[in-house]
């Protein structure tokens, strides 16, 4: 039996593939390579270049492979892009989920672990955020993912498809051997941008806004290491394999760091005096996003190994030093 990883050529998906292979699992990857990188997929995994909205091609994968469970990372995830192009997000993310659930139903595959997001909460009413807090997304990305969560819930009632939604906060870092890592084009995420500045590929990092309602005025996020995040998916697969009911879990570290603190941590991690300037706020950024991950720890038994951002950034720097131009250096 194999685990199907949709979006397995992406940043988080490719780390998941490596962790599943480490555990001796058979892994099948589906990715349309619009955002992902073929070189990120471990050679031991079977690879199909298929778009999840292509029902026929996806059905052929399920026909050929003996799929036991699905882990779904194949979605667009850039908040400002979703505001500019909402339909692109509802098409790829939300409509993609309709096709996937139809194919799972046709082939009697009953387990799915899904990449959800803190963006489904919108502006939080409590910090840290609990799974039971209201979900009122403030951008199309968060809305598209909330709709996907709801679809799975209805598919559970109608077809008994069991699901776990993992609501990620801010993911960073790379596998410790530095063989795969974060590489988006164009890059919008904080840690890789700081490291571009450290590597001399940009003059400085612009910190978006210094007038947030936080102790130092810079907005605060909760950073989790990508391998810890992948391991939570493996625990979620075990949870479903034991016949547990569908559920959702926040994945964060419970400690918030401001943009300025992240730059400082990156200076220490890299030994480079990274230049930083304050710029205007970026639209749609809440002041603080920090997770209460008690449920993931208690119910799934999740124990993240990385508990400080300096160590997380060191692993991202290792990938960056080995591959200054990301996957362009691996072709
Ligand atoms: N930031 C800067 N300068 C930059 C880039 C980012 O100051 O050049 C700041 C942002 O304003 C934000 C923080 O760094 O405060 C993190 O920004 P990212 O773009 O790295 O990440 P986001 O918090 O916007 O979003 C990420 C994921 C989303 C997910 C969200 C949940 O990309 O998919 O975390 O917390 F929904």
Image: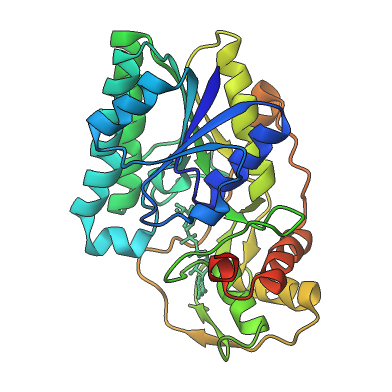
Q: Can see residue 152?
A: yes
* Residue farthest along the bottom direction in this orientation: 203
Q: Position of residue 22 (x, y in %)?
A: 72, 35
Describe residue 109's horizontal placement relative to residue 249 as left or right.
left
Classify residue 135 by image quadrant: top left
Quick one: 224 or 216, which is closer to the camera? Answer: 224
Colouring scheme applied when the structure was drawn: rainbow
Quick one: 191 or 250, which is closer to the camera? Answer: 191
Classify residue 325 by image quadrant: bottom right
- Residue at image position (18%, 52%) is 87
Q: Position of residue 77 (x, y in %)?
A: 40, 53
Describe residue 259's horizontal placement relative to residue 149 as left or right.
right
Looking at the image, is 285 positioned above or below residue 74? below
- Residue at image position (43%, 68%) is 185
- Residue at image position (63%, 88%) is 200
Looking at the image, is 272 positioned above or below residue 236? below
Quadrant in the picture for the N terminus: top right
- Residue at image position (37%, 28%) is 61
* Residue farthest along the left direction in this orientation: 87
Q: Can see residue 136?
A: no
Looking at the image, is 277 positioned above or below residue 174? below
Please count the marks in the image: 0
Looking at the image, is 150 positioned above or below residue 157? below
Q: Position of residue 219 (x, y in %)?
A: 54, 67
Classify residue 220 by image quadrant: bottom right
């Amino acid at each position: 039996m194999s685990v199907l990883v949709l979006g397995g050529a992406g940043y988080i998906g490719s780390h998941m593939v490596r962790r599943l292979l480490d555990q001796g699992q058979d892994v099948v990857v589906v990715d349309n390579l619009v955002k992902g990188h073929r070189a990120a997929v471990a050679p031991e995994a079977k690879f199909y270049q298929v778009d999840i909205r292509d029902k026929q091609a996806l059905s052929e994968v399920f026909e050929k492979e003996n799929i036991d469970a699905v882990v779904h990372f194949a979605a667009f995830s850039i908040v400002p892009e979703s505001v500019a192009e909402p339909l692109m997000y509802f098409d790829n993310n939300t409509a993609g989920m309709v096709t996937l659930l139809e194919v799972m139903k046709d082939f009697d595959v009953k387990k799915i672990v899904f990449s959800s997001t803190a963006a489904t909460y919108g502006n939080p009413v409590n910090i840290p955020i609990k799974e039971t807090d209201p979900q009122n997304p403030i951008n199309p990305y968060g809305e598209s993912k909330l709709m996907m969560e709801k679809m799975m819930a209805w598919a559970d009632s109608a077809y008994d498809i069991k699901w776990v939604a993992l609501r990620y906060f801010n993911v960073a870092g790379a596998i410790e051997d530095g063989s795969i890592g974060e590489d988006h084009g164009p890059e919008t995420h904080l840690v890789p941008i700081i490291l571009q500045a450290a590597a001399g590929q940009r003059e400085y990092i612009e910190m978006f806004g210094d007038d947030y309602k936080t102790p130092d005025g810079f907005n605060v996020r909760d950073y989790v290491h990508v391998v810890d995040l992948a391991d939570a998916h493996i625990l979620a697969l075990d949870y479903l394999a034991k016949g547990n009911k569908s559920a959702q879990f926040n994945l964060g570290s419970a400690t918030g760091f401001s943009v300025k603190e992240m730059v400082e941590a990156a200076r220490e991690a890299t030994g480079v005096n990274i230049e930083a300037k304050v710029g205007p706020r970026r639209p749609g950024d809440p002041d603080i996003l920090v997770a209460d991950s008690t449920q993931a720890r208690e119910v799934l038994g999740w124990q993240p190994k990385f508990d400080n951002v300096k160590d997380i950034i060191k692993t991202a720097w290792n990938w960056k030093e080995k591959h200054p131009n990301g996957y362009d250096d691996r072709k």
